[in-house]
Image (cartoon, rainbow, N blue to C red):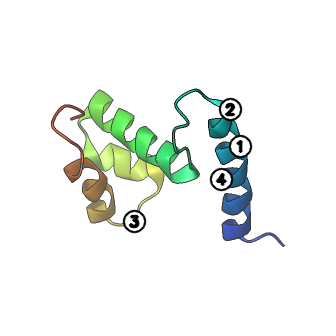
């Protein structure tokens, strides 16, 4: 049986390999994709409860922490 951590490690290694091939070499991880999804859902809906449910957070505070940490230009 595969553990979530093992799968995440493999995905992140692949993403690092891809980012190394890009000109500006951004840091790309599974978490950065998740953060991007939460940010985009928030920008599109402004409905924190919808975003919480969409990403599977149990506590609204978990989702809110992503939105609270966004710079004003991204909100």
Question: Image quadrant of residue 75?
Answer: top left
Q: Earlier in the sequence, mark 1 or mark 4?
A: 4
- From mark 3 to mark 4, how far is it between C-alphas? 25 Å
Residue pointed to by mark 2: 21
What element does badge 3 sit on?
A: loop
What element does badge 1 sit on?
A: helix
What element does badge 2 sit on?
A: helix
User: Pointer 1 and pointer 2: residues touching (CB < 8 Å)?
Assistant: yes
Q: State left or right for residue 8 relative to residue 40.
A: right
Residue pointed to by mark 1: 17
Estimate how packed mark 4 is, as few (under 14), some (14 to 19) or many (20 or more) residues with alpha carbons within 10 Å.
some
User: Pointer 2 and pointer 3: residues touching (CB < 8 Å)?
Assistant: no
Which residue is at 28% across, 31% downward?
Answer: 43
Residue pointed to by mark 4: 12
Which residue is at 34% across, 39% downward?
Answer: 39
User: Pointer 1 and pointer 4: residues touching (CB < 8 Å)?
Assistant: no
Residue 42 position within the rendered picture, expressed as x and y whole percent measured from the top left: 30, 38
Q: Nearer the viewer, residue 48 or 15?
A: 15
What element does badge 4 sit on?
A: helix
Q: Nearer the viewer, residue 23 or 41?
A: 23
Residue pointed to by mark 3: 58
Q: Earlier in the sequence, mark 3 or mark 4?
A: 4
Residue 53 position within the rendered picture, expressed as x and y whole percent measured from the top left: 41, 51
Q: Is residue 21 above or below residue 49?
A: above
Question: Image quadrant of residue 71?
Answer: top left
Estimate how packed mark 3 is, as few (under 14), some (14 to 19) or many (20 or more) residues with alpha carbons within 10 Å.
few
Which residue is at 70% across, 53% downward?
Answer: 13
Q: State left or right for residue 53 relative to residue 4.
A: left
Q: Nearer the viewer, mark 1 or mark 3?
A: 1
Which residue is at 48% across, 47% downward?
Answer: 32
């Amino acid at each position: 049986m595969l553990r979530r951590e093992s799968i995440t490690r493999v995905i992140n290694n692949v993403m690092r390999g891809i980012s190394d091939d890009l000109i500006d070499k951004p840091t790309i991880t599974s978490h950065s994709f998740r953060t991007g999804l939460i940010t985009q859902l928030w920008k599109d809906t402004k409905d924190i409860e919808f975003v919480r449910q969409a990403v599977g957070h149990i506590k609204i505070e978990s989702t809110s922490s992503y939105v609270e940490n966004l710079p004003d230009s991204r909100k």
